[in-house]
Amino acid sequence: MFLDQIITIDSAYLLEYKKIKEQLQNKQGREPRWYKFLKDHITLSDTGRLNFEISTTLIQNPMITRPTIPSVATEPIHLKGKPKWVTIWIPEISDIVYGRIIITTHYPNSIPISYIEHWINQDVSIDSRSRTPRSQPTSIVPCQGCAQHFCHYIGSCKPKCIIQVRHLHLLSITAISKKNKELIFPIARQRHNTFNVLQYSHPYYRLLAL
């Protein structure tokens, strides 16, 4: 396992072993010695607080854009203006997640964390029988709830599914409302079902938001 699989999303704490076990195929057996070794050597107390800081080096790519990193603040940050649409690769499910940012936190001595409303793929093409997969639009709708939902979110209960993610890992995307019908079909001329395409595609790669 990698370190980012056994620490909290804010890179501040070692996960409890019962949380780590949920990611394992074999969920039986006692707490392993390697976990006790980590608790004794990389944490400060029984709370699991890490005794070192993790700096993440992002691979820079001129063909993509990322949301602006907010300044350090003691209160949650509500982004102004139009909804900020983003996507992120979730290694736990080996898939891409789409959404729009609800709030972002950047507390002192912590990395920025964003809470996004989860949106999922849905094919709404009327004439899908006569269109190839590559020519159909990438359409997304709000998720009504899934295993990725962060149940400890404190805020508006209007979104049915909210995901907690590292802000630094987000990629910016553009979503087009279904009201702009002239833009429905021309927006998807590339494959969109792999992380590599989103990572290396044009920064104005677009999605259809319903």
Image (cartoon, helix red, strand yellow):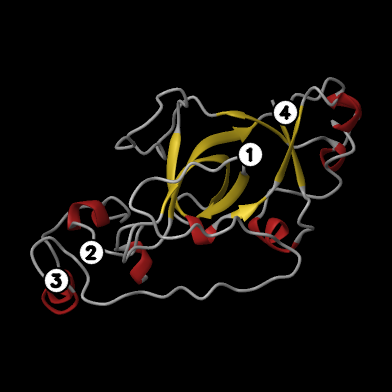
Q: Amino acid at mark 3?
A: Lys
Left or right position of 139 against 169: right
Kindly identify which numbered label has been placed on residue 123: 4
Specify which label sits upstream in the sequence, 2 or 3: 2
Specify which label sits upstream in the sequence, 1 or 4: 1
Between 70 and 20, which is closer to the camera in this rendering? 70
Residue at 40% in and 24% down: 157
Q: Amino acid at mark 4?
A: Asp
Residue 182: percent from the left, percent from the top? 91, 28
Contact between marks 1 and 3 (CB within 8 A): the answer is no
Q: Which residue is mark 3?
A: 39
Label 2: how many Cα within 10 Å (few below 14, some 14–19, many 20+)? many
Q: Quadrant of residue 162?
A: top left
Between 67 and 126, which is closer to the camera in this rendering? 67
Is residue 140 depicted above or below 113 in this figure?
above
**Distance between mark 1 and mark 3 Cα atoms:** 44 Å
**Distance between mark 1 and mark 4 Cα atoms:** 28 Å
Q: Quadrant of residue 126?
A: top right
Contact between marks 3 and 4 (CB within 8 A): the answer is no
**Distance between mark 2 and mark 4 Cα atoms:** 40 Å
Between 197 and 174, which is closer to the camera in this rendering? 174
